Amino acid sequence: MAQGKPVETHIAQQSPDLDEANRILQEAVQLRQQGTLETFQQAIPLFERAATLFRQAGEQRLEAVTLNNIGFIYDSLGEKQKALEYYERALPLRQAVGDRRGEAGTLNNIGAVYDSLGEKQKALEYYERALPLLQAVGDRGGEGTTLNNIGAVYSSLGEKQKALEYYERALPLRQAVGDRGGEAQTLNNIGAVYSSLGEKQKALEYYARALPLFQAVGDRSGEARTLNNIGLVYSDLGEKQKALEYYARALPLRQAVGDRGGEATTLHNIGAVYSDLGEKRKALEYYDRALPLFQAVGDRRVEAATLNNIGGVYSDLGEKRKALEYYARALPLIQTVGDRGGEGTTLNNIGLVYNSLGEKQKALEYYARALPLSQAVGDRSGEANTLLNIASLQRSQGNLENALTQMEKSIAILEDLRTKAPTTELRQTYFASV
């Protein structure tokens, strides 16, 4: 997850108008630091007023600071296009006054918005413009933030080892400057990479290091994100009730800070647990609550995942044509944002539907498209699932030797994943559920 630049505040040379602008700016900053939906909304008109006064006084540096803060609030509220407007107004002002540190911060924030909108290559461009500026001014904290953000992009693109390299460069920088919130962010991200690689014990260790740091600095958004991620690990390990407990702790935190994208993510994850538990109608309720939130914040990647999961529920309920409609809506969104792992999952699911409809050759075509995508992003669980689906189809067609080969590959992957569960109890749970 990308992380933006912290609150900024500077003081201009005094004059009656600038006295008023500085007073308003300080009041807005105090509201923003409280981090609630209500205080964010109260801060925006104050920042707007301060920006106008700074512009009238010719204080470009302070105007840029104020615009950047407004952008950050809109970004936090999920209004990404509005955030971009303010960041793009701030950027030339920072360049004009030679504020390289501020310029880098705004570049970093623009990159974070493009990242959240699924435009990963564009995000990388902005982060890579920010990095040398931060190194030039010796801003180790900002350098650590940007390295973390680059790692997050590579992780979302499926390049997990490259992501780890950037996170491991970021972590000591954040620790060196005493940025406990940033340290927690990077620890959380490393945990997410290990989780995606099937190393669940390592993931839980990093999440356990991140959680108290987020709590110590009062970062409720980061705390919620980590609780959500711990829930994901337990869900993957088959500990569904434990997963629900962590999601239930994350959800009100995300609602309190106005993080609509995060709220949607947790609602989506709760839906997935209920689906796994066989409570399909309850799952649909949570997915249906999540979907408009994802659409509102422009998160096409997770919107696609939710459409995909709704399709899965309808498939399980026997409504196969309705399932195909949702998968058909999900697929182009996933391809647009470059989510190869999600694309593989959706193709596999379409294959399952065609298989159940008796269209075996069509099913095999979709499985064959899904498999290399799962392999490319290191989604070993998805790879095992697709191999098993291919084996089942081949067995039904009498291709027993080929079916046996695919089954053996699938079992080998699942057994390896099972051995990475952190305790004997969880290994048994994973074996029983998978």
Image (cartoon, rainbow, N blue to C red):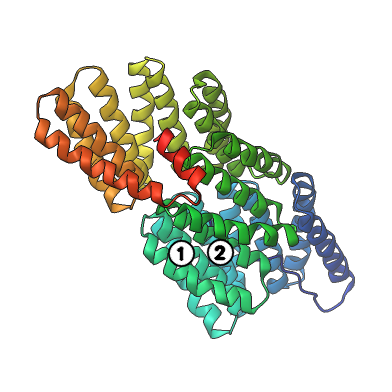
- Residue 190 to residue 59: above or below: above
Image point 22% across, 44% down: which residue? Answer: 409
Query: Dot 2: what SS?
Result: helix
Q: Quadrant of residue 343?
A: top left
**Of residues 67 and 54, the one drawn nearer to the viewer in this rendering:** 67
Total numbered labels placed on residues in the image: 2
Q: Which marked residue is nearer to the observer: mark 2 or mark 1? A: 2
Image location of residue 426, percent across then percent down? 50, 43
Q: Quadrant of residue 100?
A: bottom right
Image location of residue 98, percent across then percent down? 60, 80
**Could you tell which of marks 2 and 1 lies nearer the N-terminus?**
1
Q: Is residue 431 left or right of residue 109?
A: left
**Of residues 363 and 60, the one drawn nearer to the viewer in this rendering:** 363
Q: Is residue 112 left or right of residue 263?
A: left
Residue, disc 2: 186
Q: Amino acid at mark 1?
A: Gly
Image point 50% across, 26% down: which residue? Answer: 277
Q: Which mark is residue 108?
A: none
Image location of residue 174, percent across then percent down? 60, 73
Q: Which mark is residue 151?
A: 1
Image point 53% across, 27% down: which residue? Answer: 274
For disc 2, the neighbor class at 10 Å (few under 14, some 14 to 19, many from 20) is many
Q: Is residue 87 visible?
A: yes
Query: Dot 1: what SS?
Result: helix
Image location of residue 301, percent across then percent down? 44, 43
Q: Amino acid at mark 2?
A: Thr
**Cβ atoms at labels 2 and 1 below 8 Å apart:** yes
Which of the image's four quarters has the C terminus?
top left
Q: Using the numbered discs, state the Cα–Cα distance from disc 2 to disc 1 in whole angstroms.
A: 9 Å
Q: Is residue 96 visible?
A: no
Image point 36% across, 59% down: which residue? Answer: 159
